[in-house]
Image (cartoon, grey):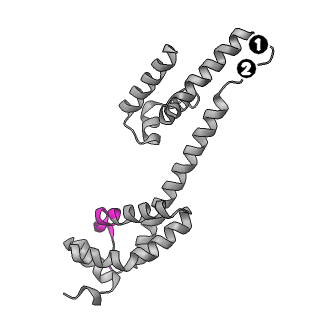
Amino acid sequence: MEYGRLTDEEAMAAFRLSADEKLFEELVRRHTGRALLAAQAMLGDATAAEDAVQECFLRLIRARSSYEPGKPFAGWLVTILRNICRDELLRRKRKAQAEANLQASAVAPEADSPAEEQEENQIVQASFAELPLLDREILVLRIHGGLEFHEIGARCGLSAEAAKKRAYRALERLRRR
């Protein structure tokens, strides 16, 4: 079979059934350049674009059975890529919001509070700032956001149990200080 003579739709329809590595390589060869340009335009970052395109082709392999033969392949591929880029942009936005929330959640001491309370607030703020970013994010989501550990885990890419353990250990570190 001459893979270069197949249309994208024919190549994908055949790959859908056979998982033939040569067909996949042909599709990657044909679409990587345009996919990189599209991802870079959406993400504004060449490295993130490369990661997104790699993830796109991995998802193509996993989702090949959902491809409908006869439908435009390029549109299907771009939809996968667009979803990956949107997820990345949302992840960035959540991270920026979490960092902003961390900054905002640091309680500034009031001018008329006792000196001891001001010193204690400064110690708490400094101790909190020394925690790893992920631990700070977990504590903010739990304490200020009121989220359950399964929700925190989903947002941070962890299991619920891992999020719970990190929160417990971070609180223990704060208590020791």
Looking at this rendering, what residue extends furthest in the bottom direction? 5
Location of mark 1 (residue) = 113
Q: Which mark is residue 50?
A: none
Q: Tell me residue 89's x, y (percent).
A: 54, 55
Q: Secondary structure at mark 1?
A: loop
Q: What residue is pinned by disc 2?
A: 109
- From the viewer's perspective, tell me whether residue 116 is left or right of residue 166: right
- Residue 122, percent from left and from top: 65, 20
Q: In which quadrant will I find the N terminus?
A: bottom left
Mark count:
2
Q: Gap in Å between the C-alphas at discs 1 and 2?
A: 7 Å
Q: Is residue 71 visible?
A: no
Q: Residue at x 61, y 18 (%)?
A: 123
The residue lying toward the viewer, choosing from 80 and 119, is: 119
Q: Are marks 1 and 2 in contact (CB under 8 Å)?
A: yes
**Placement of 169 over or under 154, stated as above or below:** above
